[in-house]
Image (cartoon, rainbow, N blue to C red):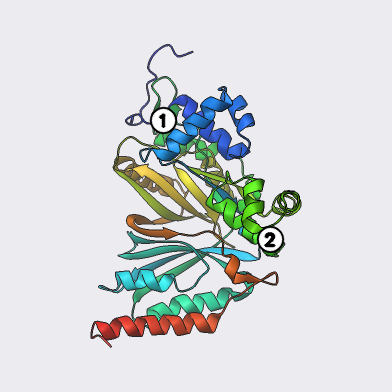
Amino acid sequence: MCSGPVKYRGKVLSKLLTAIDIKMLQALRDIGPRNLSKVARITGISRKTLMLRIKRMQSDPQFFLRMHTSVYHTNLGLRKCVVFVEAEPGMERLLFDCLLINGFWIYVCRSYGRGEGCTAVYAIPTEHCMEFEEFIHEIKRLGVAKSAQIVWSTCFQSGRITSEWFDDCQENWVFQWDNWIKEVQTQTTELPYTLVDPETYCNYADETDVKMLELLEADATTSMKEISKSLGISPQLARFHCQKHLIGKNLIEGYEIFVMRYGDPHYFMAYFTITFHNYETFARFTRSLLNKFFAITLGKMYGENGLIVEVFLPHEEFRKVIDTLSKMAKMKLVRSYEYAIQDLRVRIRQTIWPPLFKDNHWIYDHKNHLDALQQKVSEVLSKSGQS
């Protein structure tokens, strides 16, 4: 029971979420939004009240609640990567369009911080990774980009909205950056499987599985009845694929529950790449983020002691996390860090791609990608008189 305001060194932000909301969002992430009865029991409210809260937060743009199923791309034979590309001046829009030509993109946004350009997330069939790198370098060769960095990653671990830095009494977020530094030093090195380099990239899916994943990734609340109707299969077959394939073959990583965290409208979303001196410091730092509400997604740099993390922070606190990383670098807890801030005015996201999956194999047409890229650049430059 609260006896009065709790004092923190950290900054206290304007209110948006309540303590019940935090508990509900955490349960939705851990259990899944299709089991609302269990979520309601854990949250301590009725199922009806839970549904009303969810609908309110989905319809109100101030909350912007979205619930997606997180696909475990590794077991679909796909390797994740994040691409940071700096545009040639005047080519920013063309760069954005060029990155969409390769259909295996997941998310593309304009960004700044590593120069003016774009940040993009892809999942590439593992046997075509070198061809994908050639595609990105072709964008640079054509004069659209000044530089490009491709960071291969494990599949992503979706973040959790927890009460770790939430004051239940005042119903406000608090930021305890100094305590985070101490916490990093006391963590264990055990990490979830999503943040460990996979030994293999095997495809365990069939075409029905991929189509179901598309629907669930778009909306994690989609029922088996709705899926069966959409795909033209029986509910029994839909449930079989869900239990034996999607769950049984680990094609689903978990759930992504996104909600606006802050009442303050001034915030940053950014991708950080952080490297470490050894595996132990990497693992301790990464583990410290597993219960931090500002970490949206995390991925291990494949084959390296490095982390890719997407953060969501208020403007003032964003600068403070930079200060904190600087302190950690002096303490040898971190080796280096870079970031790209997302320009949320220009971004696009898509689900997994059933049209690119035939006869249980991914269709990756490298020649078509290069031809389409060259044609796109030629057309745009010709219209602008730069050819």
* Residue identifier under label 1: 17
Going 70% across and 56% down the picture, which residue do you hit? 233
**Image height check: is 182 above or below 146?**
above
SS label for mark 1: loop
Q: Residues within 10 Å of mark 2 (few under 14, many from 20)?
A: some
- Where residue 285 appears, x then y in whole percent? 52, 45
Tell me the kind of residue under disc 1: Leu
Residue 164 visible? The answer is no
C-alpha separation, residue under disc 1 versus residue under disc 2:
38 Å
Residue 136 visible? The answer is yes
* Residue identifier under label 2: 208
Going 24% across and 82% down the picture, which residue do you hit? 384
SS label for mark 2: helix
Q: Quadrant of residue 110?
A: bottom left
Nearer the viewer's eye, disc 1 or disc 2? 2
Q: Quadrant of residue 74?
A: bottom right
In which quadrant will I find the C terminus? bottom left
Mark 1 or mark 2: name the one nearer the start of the chain: 1
- Where residue 312 appears, x then y in whole percent? 40, 45
